[in-house]
Image (tube, helix red, strand yellow):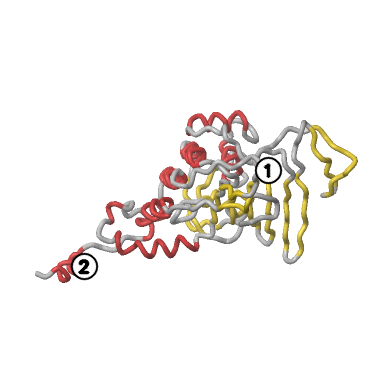
Amino acid sequence: MDDLRLVRELGDEVPLATPVQLAPARARLLAAMPVTPAVTSLTDSRRRARPRWRLVLSGVAAVGVAAAVASVLVLAPDQVGGGVSVAKADPTQVLHSAAAAALRLPDTIPDPDQYVYLRSQDGQEVYESWRSVDGTRDGLVRKTTGGNSEEIPLPGCRNGRAAFVKGGQVDPNRTEPCTPAPAYRPDLPTDADALRVYLVEHGNGVPGDVNNFAKDVRSLGQEYLRPASRAALYEAAAGQPGLRVVEHAQDGAGRSGIGIAWPSTSGKGETVLVFHAQTYAYLGLAATSAVLDLAIVDQVGQTG
């Protein structure tokens, strides 16, 4: 029997892996792809490398890469997750996969004088924010609806004082007491149990409330976290009770993904976090918000 005939017959006997079966392998492949740090302009007559990082969550690139590797995985369906459909997926396993993918992101430490840039969408409204890495430099929030934009200053906190903002404008004659609010927190725990305790002590709402915990996970998902801290966040979330999978959940930009729902203790609905179905990247909150771009940049107004 020739080799080509053997391959054809083997292909007839082994069924094609489903998209859900391929998802974990896609996540591993995409997460392992290298990201080359950018280099800024000349400083003091020499080129100085600065930490740069970007995570674009459109999912467009993921589709092409996943299609390219699909044929390689056909002969090993047992290595790519079994035959569980999205509707029957285990929410804990989805969060574990999100944590595993996070650990393979580039581990970049931003400089204190840089900014965390976030672009998000809520229906027809698009928000952009530039937040100071160390909280001492002036940032900005820009809200765009249709063709109209509104900008709100984010004063940095220096020497215990910050510019006073009223009606979206800085009052040049007033300052107010402040505490720096860094956009990057290097001391965030990297262990799931420690991070769970941290959120109970420092999170929003009533400590121990499952729905409030979900909101804290959502808030941190929109910030720049080092890979170990982001992975710990999803592992901590996986330990929460009452989670369930929402098939074909959509974020605030209408992108479809895997939803993880937290029950509401008040009985008034639930919080649904949406993850990309192939890469397990966090997309946003179902029908409310979407994270479109998250990056470390050098100045306010820079987007790439």
- 292 up-or-down from 105: above or below: below
Q: Is mark 1 on a helix, strand or loop?
A: strand
Give the alpha-carbon distance from disc 2 to disc 1, as whole Å: 57 Å
Residue at x 46% of width, y 36% of height: 239
| Label drawn at residue 12 | 2
Which residue type carries mark 2? Asp
**Residue 291: numbered disc:** none
Extreme residue toward the front, this view: 45
Mark 1, residue position: 132
Work out which quarter of the rendered image holds the N terminus and state it: bottom left
Identify residue type, mark 1.
Ser
Q: Which residue is drawn at 54% across and 56% down?
A: 57
Q: Answer with the quarter of the image where residue 155 lies.
A: top right
Q: Residues within 10 Å of mark 2 (few under 14, many from 20)?
A: few
Give coordinates of residue 63: x percent, y percent.
44, 63
Image x and y of residue 92, in percent: 43, 43
